[in-house]
Amino acid sequence: MNPLFFLTSDDGYYSKGYRTLLNFFKEKNIDYFSIVPSDNKSGISHAISLNKTLDLKEKEKNVYLIKGTPVDAILLTLFGNLIFKKPDIIISGINRGFNLGVDILYSGTVAAVKEGFIYGIPGIALSIGNNSGIIHWETAEFFLEKLVDYISKNYNKLGKFLWNINIPDVARDKIKGIEWTKLGKIHYLNPVEIIERNKKFKLGGKMNLVPETGTDVSAVLSNKISITPLNLFGTEEEEIERRKQVSFL
């Protein structure tokens, strides 16, 4: 039996990245089901529309819109009695702009697959860089085909996985391979722009990438596709060992 894919995006239904993802599944006639925010929810992280009523609107076959978050979409699919079975694999994206390093904390793209992972569903957060006004979506689609083909053939033996994938924004022939990575270091220069003192501000800033070997940052700067296996747990095991003898009582 072929796996059932669940598709969503924090960029929303009308975004180029989500349309690229959805159209690929439609054209390849691969089993999918999708709930997606009707508008852009970038940077919303793991937010849930707690204790709010969510209206579900059928947009096209197997595709529904909500005025909610990517995590809402996952919960509705798993517990809303909308489909005959839980999906086998979640793909969230294709996000416009990298989700590298600490940015996974802010990312609705990553949050969607983390929510599915909590309930035992493997997932992939898929992003492409945004280096210019013209994004190489054809590169993302080429990789997506290879990825889905691999998963479809091997998903019974892959086990439970949570992958954060970043694709460099370059032509397909410029991609120099795939690298399995750890999260790298990024920080933002001038994250708060003062529009009007004491009254108006704009959050953002310029991303500064630190290219340490073996990281997602280093991979994409080398025009390699980065695949970072994630987990849900934030416990720092080494810190426990270092502090075992420290007591405040």
Image (tube, helix red, strand yellow):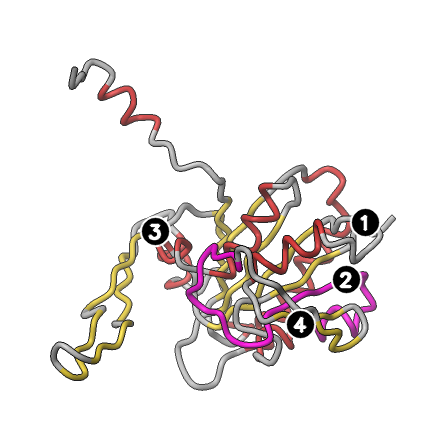
Residue of label 1? 85
* Residue at (20, 76) in percent of width and height: 193
User: In this image, 221 relative to 158: left or right?
Assistant: left
Q: Earlier in the sequence, mark 2 or mark 3?
A: 2
Tag 1: Cα neighbours inside 10 Å, few (<14), some, or many (≥20)?
A: few
Q: Are marks 2 and 1 in contact (CB under 8 Å)?
A: no
The image quadrant where one finds the C terminus is: top left
Image height of 195 relative to 146, above or below: below
Three-letter amino acid code at disc 3?
Gly
Mark 4 or mark 2: which is in front? 4
Local crowd at mark 3 within 10 Å, few (<14), some, or many (≥20)?
A: many
In 3D space, how far apart are the residues under numbered discs 4 and 2 (Cα atoms)? 15 Å
Mark 4 or mark 2: name the one nearer the start of the chain.
2
For the residues labelled 4 and 3, the Cα–Cα distance comes to 34 Å
Q: In whole angstroms, how far apart are the C-alphas of marks 2 and 1?
A: 12 Å
Report which residue position mark 4 lands on.
Answer: 65
Nearer the observer: mark 4 or 1; the answer is 4
For marks 4 and 1, the one nearer the N-term is 4
Which type of secondary structure does the marked residue at label 4 adopt? strand
Specify start and end residues of the magenta stretch as a single range: 21-49
Q: Which mark is residue 32?
A: 2
In magenta stretch: residue 23: yes
Residue occupied by mark 3: 184
Image position, residue 241 (x, y; %): 28, 19
91 left or right of 103? right
Tell whether position 150 is magenta: no
Q: Position of residue 100 (x, y in %)?
A: 39, 58
- Locate residue 148: give its quadrant: bottom right
